[in-house]
Amino acid sequence: MQVTHLLTRKFGALALAASLALGAVPGAAQNLFAPVVRVNEGVVTAYELDQRARMLGVLRAPGNPRELAREQLIDDRLRAQAAEAAGIAPTEQEVLDGMTEFAARADLSREEFVQALAGAGVAEQTFRDFVRAGLSWRQLVQARFAGRVNLSEAEIDRALGASGGSSVRVLLSEIIMPAPPQQADEVMQRAERISQTTSVSEFSAAARRYSATATKQAGGRLPWQNLDDLPPVLRPRVLALAPGEVTDPLPIPNAVALFQLRDIEETGYDAPSYAAIEYAAYYMPGGRSTETLAKARVLQSKLDRCDDLYGVAQGQPPEVLERQSLPPSEIPTDIAFELSKLDAGEVSTALTRSNGQTLVFLMLCGRTAEAGEDVDRQQFALGLRNQRLQSMAESYLAQLRADARITTP
């Protein structure tokens, strides 16, 4: 069987000729090795961008190949810089083994896979660099976070309940724009315009400009999330999207929310279904003023669990502290979405009430899983550990992006 046919059979209707239609960088005289993006002290060249886009076309990656290639190469530079700073570098044999492992997903040997890529104009070095970046990051994540992913038996007990959970997870970006009454129409019109984009970079630029959440500096990018962790009202909206598409504007108290789907996948890990989610909301006057946000950061540094908020609210009117344990379907949409980003004991300060005059200091107390049967406890615990490790890695990469100097020459 021919190599290209094997690759086509595994990845779908590839149409390698279509990959060639990506073409070289416009302008025959352009220097292919000129930088197109600077990432801190590193660069991404026009040649690398073209090569990665060709490879993504062959692999049938969702979305625009050139745009996705640009984002991937920026992330690769950040990963490589972090790994180098930590003194981590895969050996040549590890890289070759990684290439072999990747090729095996298409039922090909390394040599056959390289040959198939060459037929689409992709150099072997491009494949090698792709694998090296992934290995460097995996080794860095293991060294940095593996020791922190220790699950107690009690945590596994609380998380059990995988039967009935969804194995679909999604990669989203968010924009939450404050919409006080006097600006509601203007904000909604802006949201309608943003919702028409299918460009990841345009959506990220809008998030940096307009969003009021902690993710704005990262272009609104969120880590992978289980579909079941999203508010029920949001799940069908997200499932209706193709990668790159944006939800219709979603009105929430004092704000308008937009979500862009960057990627979606089905995993082998069934996420728990939750019978109830417990949270506490402490209401602070002053909204998102600099002074109030500073007070919230100080308060956050002093708290470990929801019970600690009772001491904070002591002597104040009862309505300043609200604690609830509700089924996911009964939690307000904006609160439910913020809770979906948190682990127990973590805090969000993205929301307001009273037309923006009150800051919601929101803390997740815990999640109660539905009872599960016939669950392989060891496999479930392994999936849970891997999921937590992946979440830490994605948060770390998001922080690297937020701190990086990323410019276009």
Image (cartoon, grey):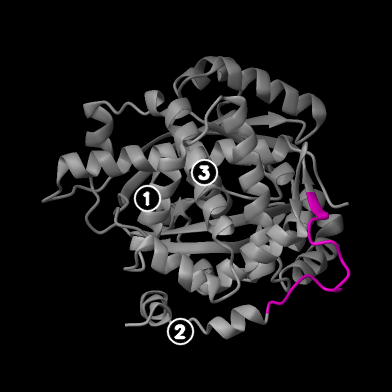
Q: Which one is earlier in the sequence, the residue at label 2 or at label 1?
A: 2
Position of 293 with respect to 408 (left or right) is left
In the image, residue 56 lies at what x, y percent? 56, 67
Disc 2 is placed on an element classified as loop
Residues marked 3 and 2 touching at CB (< 8 Å) = no
The location of residue 203, given as percent across then percent down, is 73, 61
Would residue 174 appear left or right of 94 to someone viewing this image? right
Q: Residue 97, relative to residue 282: is it above or below?
A: below
**Label 1 sits on residue:** 327
Magenta extent: 22-37
Q: Residue at x 35, y 58 (%)?
A: 267
Q: Which residue is mark 3?
A: 341
Number of the front mark, 2 or 1: 2
**Residue found at x 73% / y 55%:** 204
- Which residue occupies 36% across, 68% down? 106
What amino acid type should be assigned to the residue bearing mark 3?
Lys
Magenta span dominant secondary structure? loop
Percent of width and height locating residue 325: 39, 40
Q: Earlier in the sequence, mark 3 or mark 2?
A: 2
Q: Position of residue 110 (x, y in %)?
A: 39, 61
Residue denoted by label 2: 13
**Residue 346 against residue 235 in the figure, above or below:** above
Category of crowding for the residue at label 2, using alpha-carbon neighbours closer than 10 angstroms: few (below 14), some (14–19), many (at least 20) = few
The residue carrying pointer 3 sits among few (fewer than 14), some (14 to 19) or many (20 or more) residues within 10 Å by Cα, namely: some
Quarter-of-image position of residue 352: top right
Q: CA distance from mark 3 to mark 2?
A: 36 Å
Amino acid type for the residue under numbered disc 2: Ala
Crowding at dot 1, Cα within 10 Å, few <14 / some 14-19 / many 20+, comes out as some
In the rendered image, which quarter contains the N terminus? bottom left
